[in-house]
Image (spheres, rainbow, N blue to C red):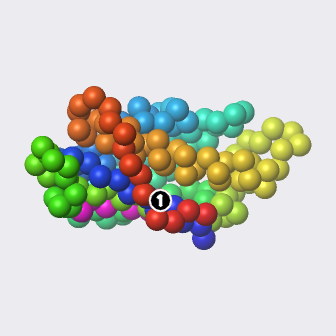
Amino acid sequence: MDRILLSTLAHRPPEEVFPYVRSFTDYPRYTEHLTEVRVHGDGDVGSVYDLQLAWWKLNYTARSEVVAIDAPESLEWRLVNDIDARGQWRVEPEPESAPEGVETASRIYFEAVYDPYSADENAISLPRFVSLDWVVDKVEPKLLGEAETVVQRLVADIEGEQRRDVELTVHEMP
């Protein structure tokens, strides 16, 4: 299993951060490869999100289920189709890290654990002469960059101010 774990600081308390983390339908604004999100449910545990992804000549719909919510601290998810993957968003208060002039801060963690070789080759319509191994080799390095982009843009929305340099800490990567 491979793992991506990164974090950053948002200049807001967890109660203000968590609704953004939980709002999967807003995620297409944060990355160019997620084109649409359809929700089946009310957003609580058991809700399923169809995440329409597009990259190169590939289109794929990942189906993600919310498996646990402990607001405003964490949200756990897992993919329910075609690939073994799960993850979590965590929000922890970190007021001691707030810069001067900012009242408080929270650390946002994004974690994804996945087995890239568990993908169902029949679930993805690959162009002729393109193997799943080739796709995994090309996509896997992009995953960290995509995770970083999502977290940076999420912080910009959370803070609702002019974009600032968001420092990301990569705790673990494949």
The single residue placed furthest to the front in the displayed view is 100
Left or right, residue 32 beside residue 118:
left
Q: Residue 51: x and y, percent? A: 49, 42
Q: Residue 39: x and y, percent? A: 38, 42
Can residue 114 be seen here? The reply is: no
Left or right, residue 163 beside residue 92:
right
Instruction: Kindly report the secondary structure that dominates the magenta region of the rendered protein.
Output: strand
Q: Which residue is mark 1?
A: 170
Mark 1 Cα-neighbour bin, 10 Å: few <14, some 14–19, many ≥20 = some
Q: Residue 34: x and y, percent? A: 51, 37
Left or right, residue 29 beside residue 75:
right
Q: Nearer the viewer, residue 102 or 25?
A: 102
Q: Is residue 162 above or below residue 40?
A: above
The single residue placed furthest to the bottom in the displayed view is 1
Q: Nearer the viewer, residue 39 or 15?
A: 15
Q: Which residues are magenta?
A: 87-92
Give the quarter of the image for residue 54.
top right
Q: Residue 14: x and y, percent? A: 19, 55
88 drawn magenta: yes
Q: Secondary structure at mark 1?
A: strand
* Mark 1: amino acid: Val
The single residue placed furthest to the right in the displayed view is 129
